[in-house]
Structure formats: structure tokens, C-alpha cells
Amino acid sequence: MPEAEELCLTVLARTPEHPLALYMLGTMGLGFDDEKALRYFARAVRAEPRNPFYHLSLGEAYLKVSEFSPAIRHIEYALAIKPDLVEALCSLGDAYNAFDKAEMALPLFEKALKLAPDHSSARMGLSHALSGLGRMDEAAVHLKNAIERRISLPAAYNALVHTRKYREEPPELAAILAELRDPDHGSESAAALHHAAGKVLNDIGRYKEAMEHFKKANQATGHKFDLENYRRWVDAMIETFTPELMASMAAYGNSSEVPVFVVGMPRSGTTLTEQICASHPDVHGAGELSKLRRIAMGYWPRQPLRREHRRIDSDNTDDLARALAEEHLAYLRERAPDAVRIVDKMPHNFELIGLIFLLFPNARIIHCRRDAIDNCISCFVLQFSKAHSYSADLQTLGLYYREYDRLMRHWQRVFPGRIFENCYETLIENQEEQSRRLMDYLGLLWDDACLRFFERDSSVNTYSRWQVRQPIYKSSVRRWKNYGSEIQPLIDSLGDLAEL
């Protein structure tokens, strides 16, 4: 890669706007430096504006950073130039899925499948859109078709087992276990298959076997997490965002009350909380948005690990905070121009609460908390991306949870009474009472629709999409007791946070 980059830069030294060199540099930046990739793709588009592949790549790069409007615009332009470009149809479908418009994604994936029946992105994208809309049976049909055709087989099995809850052993389990004996499956495929086997075994009550598969799945990913680096980062956030600093900047940013941020550990009830809030006619649930993280990177070229990044220059912060808040508010308004409240439920925004209140001093923040052991187990058993590598090992997961808890306790000290603590177990025990408290906190009159959140027909794009289509149930409370000594490393690392 470094040699390829050097060759492209040599070309640009001779021909500064060489479109192919710019395009290749953009491709090399994806996943490593998405902002740089965006800049190179944009230059490639300017240099050769009728090239559909350049527009497609620029649109996909915008999609990676949750800039949905420009993503859709450029992918649509690629399709205007080349209407049968299957990759563009799939990418536009992905964009609509992410933009909470799965119903608009369906015809795009259907057209892509007609053009290329064995295209994995088309088939998986279609099933994702259907399941996001709650049409689980239809999604399962497409996933079974993919399995028969051996298209994205491990991912298809993993998606299939999440379309329902099993009461007895299904034929899929034997098929998944047979696939695991195939040595040709790489580590990523093996991880997906182990997760799928674990999900089925867990559903039917064979917990020890399930946990063995979950452990093998996480080992197969090879994900490692630098806990010491993260501890230093939490130290830096605590050192930076002091009560004195935030008090001195209380009038900065934008006074809008529209933004609502649902935060917490993944699997702590954030999707359920968003669905309850978004069932209110004045509230729009925007899903998990990575925009705020991008704004944070605008504040700090690198996350504030080093001492020189820990100081905020108050002389320049007022104007910058105001500008970034205006930009973010416009971004939210694109999704729901008339909503009184718009909910961003990116769980890991718990790391950015200081920035949220700097941008939006009147924002509402709902912090979802759940029994620590249950919460961590629910993370461990899902196939998360590398961004959640802390969840691949039980001991590391428990220690990470302690850092999350330490940071949240800091935010509560800095912003006393400002953050609504939404306990998952309290919500499960008394749905209406806790839901009414949520609406009071949002400054909204009560609406009985909030009790029927499972009837919403909007798209849900998280692992909880099956659960939030059901009325509230209590089987997830104290779930960890099913696993016995298998989870002792987690309990030990949680220490006093583990309520036994």
C-alpha cells in the first residue's frame, strides 16, 4: 500500500488532477482515513464528472461518515449515468436503509437481483431491509435462498437465526455445525457461523454449548483492544471537561431543544428506549448516527490523548461551537423537518457528553443502564465489528465496562440532574410509569402510542430489530445466571459493579 500511494503521488506531482490517481488514493484511504478518502474522491469527480464509478465511490465514502444526503445525491448521479450498475443500486439501497427509509431500499435491491441473481450485496441488502421493516418471514425466505445458492453463506446463516426466536432445535443448527467442520472457511466466516450456532443453542436453553460457540466466535475474529490506551483517553476526558470549564461555556453553541441523545453501553436498552420515544407523534427516531463523532474529530485532530489536546481554547470555542451546532442541527432536520425532538441513539456517544452540552446546552441526554453482567453478556454474544473489539474477551469486556462506568459517573458530577438515567430493569418492570417519566424529561405531553412502540412500522437497523417488534418481556433480566462458571472472568473483572 505505501508503494502504491507513492506511485500515485508521483503521478499527481506531474499531473496534479489526474483522475485515476486521485481515485486510487481515495480507495486506499477508505477505512484508514475516511476524510482523506472523501477529499480525493471529490477531486476525482471534479476531474472527470461523467465517470459513474467516481460518483459511486464518493457516495459510498459519504455513507461511511453518515452524510446521507450527499451520499444519496452522488450514488443517484452514478445511476443516472449507468442505470444498470448493480453496485450503485446496492449502495443506494444501503444508504436508504441507513437513512431510515428501508421501504425505498426494497425496489433497488429487487432490481439489482433481477440484474444479478447471485449478487451477495443485493441479496443480503434486501433481507436486511425486510427485517428492518419487521418483515422477518420474508427476510428469512431470501436468506434461505442465499444459503441454497451458497451466497455469503456464513453471514446468511447468522442473519437467518436472528429473524426469529427458536423454541426447539431447528434443522439449521445441524447445517451450521456441518459448515463449521469445513476447513475452507476463513476466520471471519467461522466467527459468523459460531455466532449463529450460539444464538440457536442459547434460544433452546443449551447454554453451556452456546457459550462455547460464542467464545470460539470471538477468538476467531482475532480482535484485540488496547485497554490501557482507553484508560488514558478516559483520564483525558475527565481532565478536560471539568465543571468549571463547562460552567464558563454554558452559553455557547445552539439553544435548540430538538436534539435528544440516547447513550449507554450497546445492548443496554438504547433501541427500546428510542422506539418508545419515537412512538410519540412529536418525536423522530433517527437511529445510530456517527455524525457527532465526526464533529469531535473536527475539535481534536486526534482524540485528546496527549496533554496538548486536553485544553480547549475558550477564545475560539464559542464561534466554532455555534457553527458546528448549526451544521449538526441542519443534518438532523434533513431527516424530520417538523419534529419537536429528534433522537440520535448512537450508544457510544456516552464518550462525547461534554461535547454534546457544549454544542447544545439544552439537549436532552437519556443514559440507558442495565445490570452490568447482563449488559456485558449481551455484547459478548453478538458479532460486533472491530470498533467494538473490547467485547471479544470476557475479562477485557468487564474492565472496559468499568471505564464506561467511571466516565458516566464523571458526566453526572459535571452535569448534575441534566442526564436522565433510564434503568432497563425499571423500564421492564413498569413500562408505563418509566415511559411517562421519559416523556416528562423530553418536555412532551403523554401519548398512549408510547406504550405500543412495537407497532411502529419504521425501519430498525440494529441487532434489536426482532425484540423491539415484540411487547416488553422480562426473560432478558438476570439472564447471566444461565451461564454459571463459564462467565467467571467477566464477573471477576467487573468487581463491585457485578451485582450477584
Image: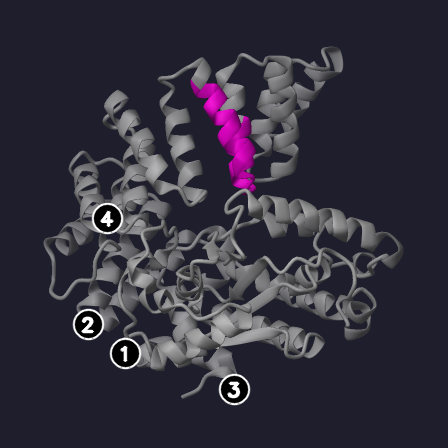
Name the residue tied to disc 2.
205
Name the residue tied to disc 4.
135
For badge 4, the amino acid type reads Arg
Q: Secondary structure at mark 4?
A: loop
For badge 1, the amino acid type reads Asn
Q: Is residue 489 left or right of residue 194?
A: right
Q: Secondary structure at mark 1?
A: helix
Q: Residue furthest right?
A: 315
Q: Secondary structure at mark 3?
A: helix
Disc number for residue 496: 3
The magenta stretch spans which residues? 58-79
Would residue 69 be counted in the magenta stretch? Answer: yes
Q: Residue at x 53, y 22 (%)?
A: 55
Q: Pointers 3 and 4 in contact (CB under 8 A)? A: no
Q: Secondary structure at mark 2?
A: loop
Q: Residue at x 53, y 40 (%)?
A: 64
> What distance separates the C-alpha of mark 1 from that of mark 3?
20 Å
Name the residue tied to disc 1.
482
**Picture coordinates of residue 244, whole percent (x, y):** 82, 73
**Front of the two marks 1 and 4:** 4
